[in-house]
Amino acid sequence: MDWTALKLSLWLAGLTAAILLPVGVLLGRVFAWRSFTGKPLLEAAFALPLVLPPTVLGYYLLAGLGEASWLGQWTRSALGLSLVFNFPGLLLASVIFNLPFAIAPVQRAFEAIPENVRNAAACCGMSWWRTLWRIELPLAWPGILSALVMTFAHTLGEFGVVLMVGGNIPGETRTIAVAIYDRVQAFDTAAASRMSALLLLLSLSAIAISYYATNRMARRHA
């Protein structure tokens, strides 16, 4: 068992979920209730990681974050930091390829809130922030929880983008999915089986907890 790779994967998944939580709430709310020019195109752009092959997305991220790109050159000159083949670059790539998992469930949750609920809050003199905090977020919480769990679980299992952008550096970018690939390549099926089973158990547990919490909340509001 590669415990270092597992620890790095859990750290990467936790950071990605934490970063995307406010992003998903903000963009999900905007997409649910606002109409503006170019909205379908913008929604499609954020949903691209769902349909693009991971190697294609990984290639474009590698090209866009590498030192040959303007972003890579700027971060190298201004911050002294490379955005590929290290953990910060891997984290940035993880945030990008998990955007649809963080936005879509939250958007659907906000869309399910009746408009008259928000209108009633406005008639009672509640501010935008108080309405969001006291009414909208509690009602949208099942979707927010689903987004967190999906983002976390997807990060744990992602392989193509991680390998393209992060490479396979022990203790830095080698995640549990890459470690499983290494063990298979070395014909160490016993270690690959143990790590695969652990990853399966972690992913199943996370999704089961999400369903349990969502169903319990739905019964409470019924």
Image: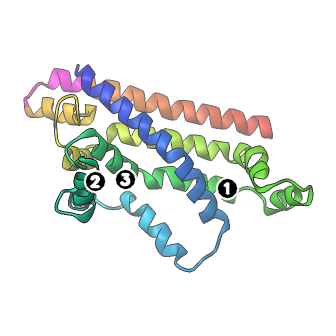
Residue type, numbered disc 1: Phe
Residue type, numbered disc 3: Phe
Q: Position of residue 101 (x, y in %)?
A: 47, 50
Q: Nearer the viewer, mark 2 or mark 1?
A: 2
- Please give the residue where the numbered disc 3 appears in the rendered image: 97
Q: Position of residue 69 (x, y in %)?
A: 21, 63
Q: Is residue 209 visible?
A: yes
Q: Are marks 2 and 1 in contact (CB under 8 Å)?
A: no
- Please give the residue where the numbered disc 2 appears in the rendered image: 78
Residue type, numbered disc 2: Ala
Numbered range of the magenta stretch: 186-193
Nearest the eye: 121 or 151: 121
Cα separation between marks 2 and 1: 39 Å
- Please give the residue where the numbered disc 1 appears in the rendered image: 110
Query: Which quarter of the figure has residue 114?
Result: bottom right
Q: Residues within 10 Å of mark 2 (few under 14, many from 20)?
A: few
Q: Are marks 1 and 3 in contact (CB under 8 Å)?
A: no
Q: Are marks 2 and 3 in contact (CB under 8 Å)?
A: no
**Is 21 part of what is drawn in magenta?**
no
Give the position of the N terminus as an image quadrant.
top left
* Circle 1 SS class: helix
Q: Residues within 10 Å of mark 3 (few under 14, many from 20)?
A: many
Query: Which quarter of the figure has residue 211?
Result: top right
* Circle 3 SS class: helix
| Residue under the point 42% across and 32% down | 203
| Residue under the point 66% across and 43% down | 141
Nearest the eye: 97 or 128: 128
Cα separation between marks 2 and 3: 25 Å
Q: Looking at this view, name the residue that lies furthest to the right.
A: 124
